Amino acid sequence: MSKSSMAEAPAAGEGKRGEGGHIGYLLRQAAAAHHLRTERALADLGVTPPQFVVLTMLAAYPGHSNADLARLALLTPQTVSVIVANLKKAGLVEATPHASHGRIVQLQLSAKGASLLAESKKRVYALETAMLGGLSAEEEAAIRRWLVRQAAGQA
């Protein structure tokens, strides 16, 4: 089949990529678009979206191990190990041994990490505000409730 005779793939929002599409696909499409926008917003800071998530979870839940962070960040333990190693090398994260469990290392943000996270959050929160633009408070609350129910398996 020649390139000229192939049908054009629909753009986001068109055909099955629009409101008539499968909800699972639409969620994936929206997540991919958000990931790309986040990646672009953080690029000049040298922060990737997964690093942003790990830094955010560390700020919210300091002292947790890599395994805990993996669960919180929805990443694999192997991915979090690589991310944490890179964040430690960059001086963004500090590790201390657990008081009673010698093999567990507790992690926290360094001052440099907290500063970088604050700037990163400004950019990501601006994206989220734009994403929610045009929605009423009630619509936003309904979307949030629905997303939480889906994540918790309470469909």
Image (cartoon, helix red, strand yellow):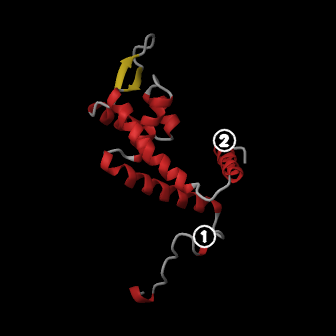
Judge left or right: residue 155 versus residue 72.
Answer: right
Where residue 107 appears, as percent x and y from the top left, is: 40, 25
Pick whichever, 72 or 13, lies toward us.
13
> Outermost residue toward the left?
89
Where residue 95 appears, as percent x and y from the top left, is: 35, 22
Mark 2 burial class by Cα count in 10 Å: few <14, some 14-19, many 20+? few
Q: Residue at x 47, y 41 (%)?
A: 75
Q: Residue at x 49, y 55 (%)?
A: 34
Where residue 9 appears, as percent x and y from the top left, is: 49, 77
Q: Residue at x 54, y 59 (%)?
A: 30
Q: Look at mark 2 in the image and give the residue it sits on.
A: 152
**Would you place residue 95 above or below residue 118 in this image?**
above
Judge left or right: residue 54 versus residue 21.
Answer: left
Image quadrant where one finds the N terminus:
bottom left
**Would you place residue 2 above or below residue 14 in this image?**
below
For label 2, the SS is loop
Q: Say whether residue 2 is visible.
A: no
Q: Say whether residue 115 is visible.
A: yes
Please tell me the numbered disc located at residue 18: 1
Question: In the rendered structure, which amino acid carries the disc numbered 1?
Answer: Gly
Mark 2 or mark 1: which comes first in sequence?
A: 1
For label 1, the SS is loop
Query: Hey, which quadrant is residue 58 in on the image?
Result: top left
Please tell me the numbered disc located at residue 155: none
